[in-house]
Image (cartoon, grey):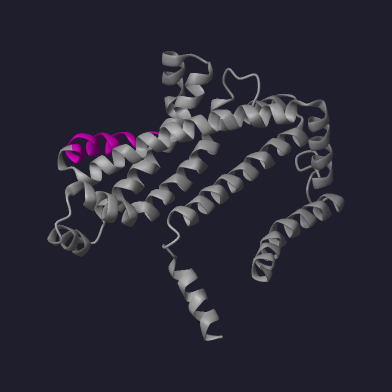
Amino acid sequence: MNNKIYQKTLEMIPPLSLLLLWELFVLIAVLDARFFPAPHVILISLWEQITLGYYWHDVSSSLIRITLGFVIGSVVGVAIGISIGISSLCRALFEPIVAATFPIPKLALMPLIILLFGLDELGKVIVIAIGVLFPVIIQTTAGISNVDQTYKEVAYNYGASRWNYFKTVALPAAAPSIFIGLKLGSGMAILLIVAAEMQGASAGIGYRIWSAYSLFDIPTMFVALSTIALLGYLSYTVIEKLEHRVISWHRSPQKERDASGKNKD
């Protein structure tokens, strides 16, 4: 417990130091307060938005879109990635399409998605799902394809069926790579929500950023940007906690070194 408290304390030092420096630089006029309002001014703006009620409305609107897009993109991405990894037929069918469409900037698809689905919620969810889809497919495919051949030979030598091999060997071995894809996908979802909400939205963090920019309300814009950063951190943390629960047997090399060091002490 003490080690966790110590680690959390260390994690708080860099952001708090940055905020203190920011406050100081605005105070001594190194930073222009018109474009970089002091942190206490941003906090005041945050409190005003909370008391007026639209802050949580923006956050909840964005979270619904992010969650739906992330779940759809993740489920489809894992399914396609597994199919490519275990089936040569699926690899021949899907891999060229993934390779060809992955480099296309997802924001460049916004006009097409608007034409097909309009400016309603479905279009915003779809653009997020597409952004999540590719990193999940790529990481899942890599995880399934890179399973040590020795494991496969041992499983089949002991009479494992194709399904048993996949369930007991391939999927657990690929799980760390799949979770990396989910982490990358969550970051992509939060990145795309800003662009998705700048078109045809009446609420959301992206809408608030654009609205604040249009009105030159810089503190409100920084509140929205800070919220995006916080959502990114929280989503990464939640997926990491889930990863530790689902694949508790997996430990990174750094954690192994830390554990061995503690045992020696």
Residue 73 on image: x %, y %? 41, 34
Question: Can you say whether 7 is above or below 49 in the image?
Answer: below
Q: Which residue is the extreme one toward the right?
A: 27
- Which span is picked out in magenta? 90-104
SS assignment for the magenta stretch, majority: helix
User: Does residue 100 belong to the magenta stretch?
Assistant: yes
Q: Residue at x 48, y 31 (%)?
A: 69
**Along the line of sight, which residue is nearer the eye, 106 or 253?**
253
**Along the line of sight, which residue is nearer the eye, 228 or 8?**
8
Residue 246 on image: x %, y %? 44, 53
Residue 208 on image: x %, y %? 68, 28
Q: Residue at x 54, y 37 (%)?
A: 191
**Along the line of sight, which residue is nearer the eye, 187 or 147?**
147
Residue 63 on image: x %, y %? 59, 32
Does 57 sit left or right of 134 as displayed?
A: right
Residue 103 visible: no
Residue 87 visible: yes
User: Does residue 206 belong to the magenta stretch?
Assistant: no
**Along the line of sight, which residue is nearer the eye, 160 or 257?**
160
Does 140 sit left or right of 67 as displayed?
A: left
Q: Residue at x 57, y 51 (%)?
A: 237
The N terminus: image quadrant: bottom right
Does 165 sit left or right of 229 as displayed?
A: left
Q: Residue at x 28, y 43 (%)?
A: 82
Where residue 172 sits, quadrant-wise, is bottom left
The C terminus: image quadrant: bottom right
Question: Can you say whether 127 is above or below 254 in the image?
Answer: above
Where residue 100 sits, quadrant-wise, is top left
